[in-house]
Image (cartoon, rainbow, N blue to C red):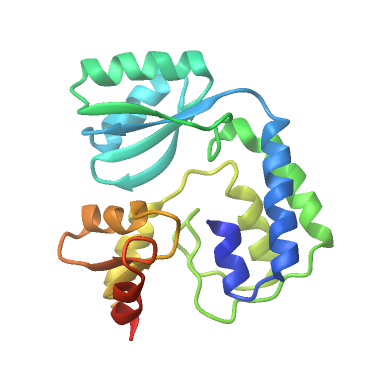
């Protein structure tokens, strides 16, 4: 998602965005084995405490009661057992080969940062908020750092949605292949207006007119 967003915002060309996506995937594949699973029903503080005890890491903060956890497979097994014992509604494994958005990918992030030295990058033509720290993207150097760090830092989706809502954004259109992000906005604020390009293209167009 981050590479598509940067392309749409004019930060780099379509070709460079595709190359960056492939490079990031390659660096992740070269990293340690691991995985990601989604935990539903526990607050963030409890999820983080169980992560630490199991040797796993928070990968996504999606809403008050939905988080993704990444780490080695044995750590994920310990986390799942502990989370279910703590009252989680569900723990579901995500079909990923590596523990993306966790410190396990620090070397992959460093490789991507060096690789991006040769990629021309420009400030976004439209406002673009970063999911690593919920800050607006600005200059080229910050862009490069945040693109790379996205591999090793958790996705702060809830903070992004909360900031956009605070700053007056009222309509959220999911342009991905599904409706996951639109639904997550509803988890943050049930009254938010959402639409999905894949679910209802015409309705999504009307939502932003």
Q: Estimate the x, y position of residue 91 in percent, counting from the top left.
A: 31, 26
Given the current orientation, which residue lies at the most extreme right position? Answer: 118
Tell me: residue 177, above or below residue 74. below
Outermost residue toward the bottom in this view: 209
Query: Residue at left 58%, top 74%?
Result: 9
From the viewer's side, name the closer residue of 142 and 164: 164
Residue at image position (75%, 56%) is 19
Give percent across and percent down for residue 79: 37, 19
Report whether 110 appears left or right of 35.
Answer: right
Q: Give the tally of numbered discs.
A: 0
Q: In the displayed structure, would residue 189 be above or below residue 99?
A: below
70 to 24, vertically: above or below: above
Residue 38 is situated, as x and y percent measured from the top left of the image, at: 36, 33
Quadrant, the C terminus = bottom left
Q: Position of residue 193 (x, y in %)?
A: 22, 70
Instruction: Please name whichever residue, 135 or 172, is drawn nearer the observer in this view of the structure.
Output: 172
Q: Is residue 193 above or below residue 2?
A: below
Q: For the point 44% across and 60% down, which residue is it?
A: 134
The residue under the point 74% across, 51% down is 113
């Amino acid at each position: 998602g981050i590479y598509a967003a940067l392309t749409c915002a004019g930060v780099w060309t379509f070709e460079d965005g595709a190359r960056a996506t492939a490079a990031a995937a390659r660096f992740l594949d070269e990293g340690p084995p691991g995985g990601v699973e989604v935990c539903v029903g526990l607050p963030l503080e409890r999820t983080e405490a169980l992560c630490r005890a199991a040797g796993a890491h928070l990968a996504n903060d999606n809403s008050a009661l939905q988080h993704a956890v990444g780490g080695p497979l044995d750590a994920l097994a310990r986390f799942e057992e502990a989370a279910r014992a703590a009252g989680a509604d569900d723990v579901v494994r995500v079909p990923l080969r590596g523990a993306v958005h966790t410190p396990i990918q620090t070397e992959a992030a460093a490789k991507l940062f060096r690789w991006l030295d040769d990629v021309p990058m420009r400030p976004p033509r439209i406002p673009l908020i970063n999911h690593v720290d919920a800050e607006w993207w600005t200059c080229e150097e910050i862009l490069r750092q945040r693109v790379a760090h996205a591999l090793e830092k958790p996705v702060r989706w809830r903070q992004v949605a909360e900031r956009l809502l605070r700053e007056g954004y009222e309509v959220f259109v999911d342009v991905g292949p599904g409706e996951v992000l639109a639904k997550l906005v509803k988890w943050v604020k049930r009254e938010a207006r959402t639409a999905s390009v894949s679910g209802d293209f015409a309705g999504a167009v009307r939502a932003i007119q």
